Amino acid sequence: MPNKPTKILLFLPQGFEDLEAVTTLDVFGWTQYRNHLPTVSVTTAGFHKVIKSRFGLTITPDLLYGEINPSDYRALVLPGGFHSHGFDEAYDARIHKLAAEIHENRGYIATMCVGILPIAEAGLLKGKKATTYPYSRYHDNVGRLRQAGAKVVNDNHVVMDDRIISCDGPGSSLEVIFLLMECLLGEEATKEVRSYMIYDQ
């Protein structure tokens, strides 16, 4: 009998970073590779009926914001993106509210790159450790994170504190999702999924 999937919400602002979104969909998709594995269902959501990434993806989300029931989800994934291509909408108060509700319900929040900044500005990182992408040409991401009360970590690619995961850029997105998987499904299931995706004799 198939196991009941764990549900996570992948929220996609305009201008999202392609790799960070695709990593989420792909890695959790591999939980369906063997019937005995606990599975994860990823629901995509956004503010618009059509969402365009920075580098060419066009997504029709499963849900629009008003259709989301936060209590349905064990985790929220918020990838980073490019402010020049619409990512500013990630700082909308509705995102703050969504993140706070999922977190208050003992859920996890997984972010990549600048996706941690809206979470920080929601007030969820005061006194907690986090990291972010340090190389933006026009934005002081690290300063913005620190101003929101976070303890900035510069020497780890991936940081987790109080069920909130952050990373320093798209190159670390795979490890973010494997860490989230371990939190949701446990070490053994995650190790098995890794073995199917990353062949290691």
Image (cartoon, helix red, strand yellow):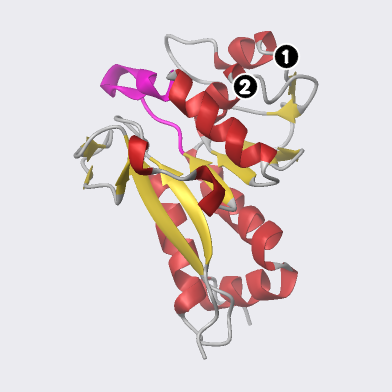
In the displayed structure, would residue 5 be above or below residue 96?
below
Residue 159 in the image, given as x and y percentages of width and height: 71, 38
In percent of the image, x 35 and y 36: which residue is there?
66
* Residue 110 visible, this angle: yes
Residue 50 in the image, given as x and y percentages of width and height: 19, 39
Residue 46 — which label?
none
Residue 45 in the image, given as x and y percentages of width and height: 35, 43
Residue reaching furthest to the right: 127
In the picture of the structure, the residue carrying the numbered disc 1 is 149
Secondary structure under the numbered disc 2 in the rendered image? helix
Q: Which residues are magenta?
A: 79-91
Quadrant position of residue 83: top left
Q: Is residue 4 magenta?
A: no
- Specify the amino acid type for callout 2: Ala
Label 2–label 1 contact, CB within 8 A: yes
**Does residue 23 appear to the left or right of 53 in the view shown?**
right
In percent of the image, x 54 and y 52: which residue is there?
73
Quadrant position of residue 116: top right
Residue toward you, 120 or 19? 120
**Does residue 151 appear to the left or right of 81 in the view shown?**
right
In percent of the image, x 42 and y 25: which residue is there?
90
In the picture of the structure, the residue carrying the numbered disc 2 is 120
Residue toward you, 131 or 110? 110
* Residue 114 visible, this angle: no
Q: CA distance from mark 2 to mark 1?
A: 8 Å
- Specify the amino acid type for callout 1: Gly
